[in-house]
Image (tube, grey):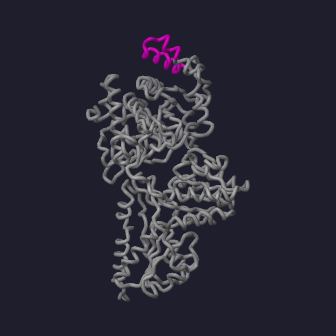
């Protein structure tokens, strides 16, 4: 049936049985496709009926659908003419998140959470001001994303308007992990209130026709009668803000979903529809999984859900082990996560020290400022977070942590090029941003040994912020230094009195070694080096490059605003006359592709770097 759906309009003529069959087919396609490519499986299995209902009730793109985070948009893609998932998240294939260049039905490409309500508020107000009162702006936000402060700022603003905003809360009780905090408790109270179950039982006995019961129930809500809502729970959380509340709705009962969305659409003002769904619905391995391994998967066996290839020992696991060991040694060390306990490696620490881990929900700004407070209270907080998400809290790092000399350690997972999740997930901005923060120190370890050492050095600093950044994926073999010059570590030397220095930051250190070998093979003396603590400018840098004609820096951050530029300025101020060549990520939004493809396209592979240096050496008057 799915092949017959080329646009949302094709859904209108389907009857109940056909829609049920279509939902089942969509789940089969999702499991089959995502198991081959990897991607966000659990979130999409949970929103099949909800997405069908959205496209049957609303008229996209006239009505604007905004998916918060966007990792649950695969079903939306299938229903809007994009059914070739063979290249999902690969270069040239479908993006893993909404993408405007793919379809007029996609609006928001940013895959950071808690933004959809602000987008919808702006779109709806724009419609009102332009006299387009025949359309709605619909925000689909999970209960996990609803923990973000930005979402509540938007709720406060929306409630003061009469704009046509429909807020669909997709409540599955989870983000990456179970949703936490007061909001979670309140929503859980609605889900589990026995009066709701009693009311449903009464309805089944009183109304032999299920459709008639649903019509009665939702008319009761929408006409402001308290009978149904009083039976379910006391409604204050949203209605006290001035929002009309509808729910809770069984998100896997398409008739019920459509009835609620239709009432919300026809209200012609701000409405919140509370929809209960089950993440991973219809796929037994996901339904039975308590660790939420199916939120995002690599290639898996569809029958079992097991990975096709076991994961190699990764950077996150190295941090997880060292965090646990340091926690055993120091009672003052506490962990902070923004709703990503397991993905950032804090799960083992939380299992042993449950009172020393704080999950703030998807609220990075709150996480950073509360870390400053923890430091003031005599503790040493460790905020483990994806590098791309710390962008959201730059002001707090600057003015709450650094200004107050707070001893806070930031462990930036997935720093640098991440690739297949697209432009908003690459952790390529952190060094360019953070190097401007007074007193802040940045470490870029190159292997497991230097990551462990850098973390211990970081938590020893109690009067300034420290940052340790490391990439996504498996960690390679250790790269020991052959000698040290101050804080600079020489990894390889070819010849005496090196004419060329190739300096690789963090995971690019191995690239520097390989590039140096290629340059040396052409007959030039060259040294490959790195530093673990890369900002401020490491001691020994000027001495190391003092006799060089060319210095090359390689980093997986911005080439024109990164630490290579900072190092070059320091050398020039010390009257170093070498020419500097900076290799890094271009200042642009990188479209989804594999890390290797982005590295090659950016000229960050060893061959491209060696070729660039050799070309300059051949042009120089003193070339040999």
Which residue ends up furthest to the right in the rendered image?
Answer: 377
Range of the magenta residues? Answer: 201-223
Looking at the rendering, which quadrant does residue 75 occupy?
top left
As drawn, 567 above or below 298: below
Residue 207 among magenta residues: yes
Q: Which of 623 and 501 is in front in this view?
A: 501
Residue 304 in percent (x, y) is at 39, 41
Asked if residue 369 is positioned above or below residue 153 in the image, the reply reads: below
Q: In which quarter of the image is the C terminus?
A: bottom left
Assign the magenta stretch its main secondary structure: helix
Q: Who's the residue at 38% across and 46% down the image?
A: 300
Expressed as whole percent of the image width and height from the top left, the position of residue 480 reads 50, 73
- The answer to whether residue 575 of the structure is visible from this angle is yes
Looking at the image, residue 447 sits to the left or right of residue 64; the answer is right
What residue is rendered at 50% in x and 45% in y?
A: 113
Name the quadrant of the N terminus.
top left
The answer to whether 535 appears left or right of 586 in the picture is right
The answer to whether residue 596 is magenta is: no
Q: Quadrant of residue 77?
A: top left
Res. 400 in view: no
Rendered location of residue 524, percent (x, y): 38, 84
Asked whether 506 or 405 is in front, the reply is 506
Q: Where is residue 228 in the image (x, y as percent from the top left)?
A: 56, 18
Q: Compared to 358, does 259 lie above or below?
A: above
Residue at image point 51% right, 21% down: 222
* Horizontal arrangement in the rendering, residue 62 relative to residue 223 (left or right): left
């Amino acid at each position: 049936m799915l092949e017959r759906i080329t646009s949302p309009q094709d859904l209108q003529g389907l009857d109940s049985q056909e829609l049920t069959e279509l939902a089942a087919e969509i789940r089969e396609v999702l499991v089959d496709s995502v198991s081959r490519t990897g991607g966000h499986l659990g979130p999409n299995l949970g929103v099949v009926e909800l997405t069908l209902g959205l496209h049957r009730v609303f008229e996209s793109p006239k009505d604007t659908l905004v998916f918060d985070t966007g990792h649950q948009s695969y079903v939306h893609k299938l229903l809007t003419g994009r059914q070739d998932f063979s290249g999902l998240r690969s270069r040239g294939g479908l993006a893993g998140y909404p993408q405007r260049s793919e379809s007029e039905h996609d609006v928001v490409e940013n895959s950071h959470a808690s933004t959809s309500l602000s987008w919808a508020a702006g779109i709806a107000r724009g419609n009102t001001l332009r006299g387009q009162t025949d359309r709605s702006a619909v925000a689909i936000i999970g209960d996990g994303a609803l923990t973000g402060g930005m979402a509540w700022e938007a709720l406060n603003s929306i409630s003061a308007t009469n704009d046509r905003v429909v807020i669909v809360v997709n409540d599955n009780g989870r983000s990456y992990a179970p949703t936490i905090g007061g909001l979670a408790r309140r929503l859980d109270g609605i889900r589990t209130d026995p009066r709701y179950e009693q009311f449903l039982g009464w309805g089944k006995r009183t109304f032999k026709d299920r459709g008639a019961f649903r019509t009665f129930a939702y008319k009761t809500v929408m006409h402001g009668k308290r009978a149904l809502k009083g039976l379910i729970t006391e409604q204050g959380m949203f209605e006290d803000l001035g929002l009309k509340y509808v729910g809770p709705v069984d998100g896997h009962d398409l008739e019920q979903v459509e009835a609620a969305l239709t009432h919300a659409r026809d209200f012609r003002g701000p409405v919140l529809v509370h929809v209960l769904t089950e993440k991973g619905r219809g796929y037994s391995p996901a339904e039975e999984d308590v660790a939420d391994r199916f939120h995002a998967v690599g290639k898996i066996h569809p029958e079992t859900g097991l990975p096709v290839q076991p994961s190699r020992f990764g950077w996150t696991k190295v941090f997880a082990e060292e965090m646990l060991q340091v926690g055993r040694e120091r009672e003052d060390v506490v962990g902070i996560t923004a709703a990503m306990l397991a993905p950032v490696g804090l799960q083992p620490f939380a299992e042993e020290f449950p009172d020393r881990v704080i999950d703030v929900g998807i609220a990075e700004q709150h996480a950073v400022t509360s870390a400053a407070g923890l430091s003031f209270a005599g503790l040493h907080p460790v905020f483990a977070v994806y590098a791309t998400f710390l962008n959201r809290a730059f002001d707090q790092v600057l003015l709450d942590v650094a200004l107050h000399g707070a001893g806070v350690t930031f462990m930036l997972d997935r720093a640098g090029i991440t690739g297949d999740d697209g432009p908003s997930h690459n952790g390529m901005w952190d060094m360019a941003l953070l190097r401007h923060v007074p007193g802040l120190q940045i470490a870029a370890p190159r292997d497991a040994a230097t990551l462990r050492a850098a973390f211990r050095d970081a938590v020893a600093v109690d009067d300034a912020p420290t940052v340790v950044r490391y990439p996504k994926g498996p960690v390679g073999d250790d790269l020991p230094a052959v000698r040290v010059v101050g804080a600079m570590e020489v990894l390889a030397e070819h010849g005496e009195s090196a004419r060329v220095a190739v300096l690789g930051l963090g995971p690019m250190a191995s690239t520097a070694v390989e590039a140096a070998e290629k340059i040396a093979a052409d007959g030039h003396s060259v040294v490959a080096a790195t530093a673990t603590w890369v900002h401020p400018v490491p001691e020994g840098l000027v001495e190391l490059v003092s006799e060089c004609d060319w210095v090359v820096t390689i980093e997986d951050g911005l080439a024109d605003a990164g630490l290579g530029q900072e190092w070059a300025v320091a050398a020039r101020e010390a009257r170093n006359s070498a020419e500097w060549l900076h290799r890094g990520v271009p200042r642009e939004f990188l479209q989804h592709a594999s890390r290797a493809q982005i590295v090659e396209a950016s000229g960050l592979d060893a061959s491209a770097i060696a070729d660039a240096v050799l070309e300059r050496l051949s042009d120089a008057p003193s070339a040999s």
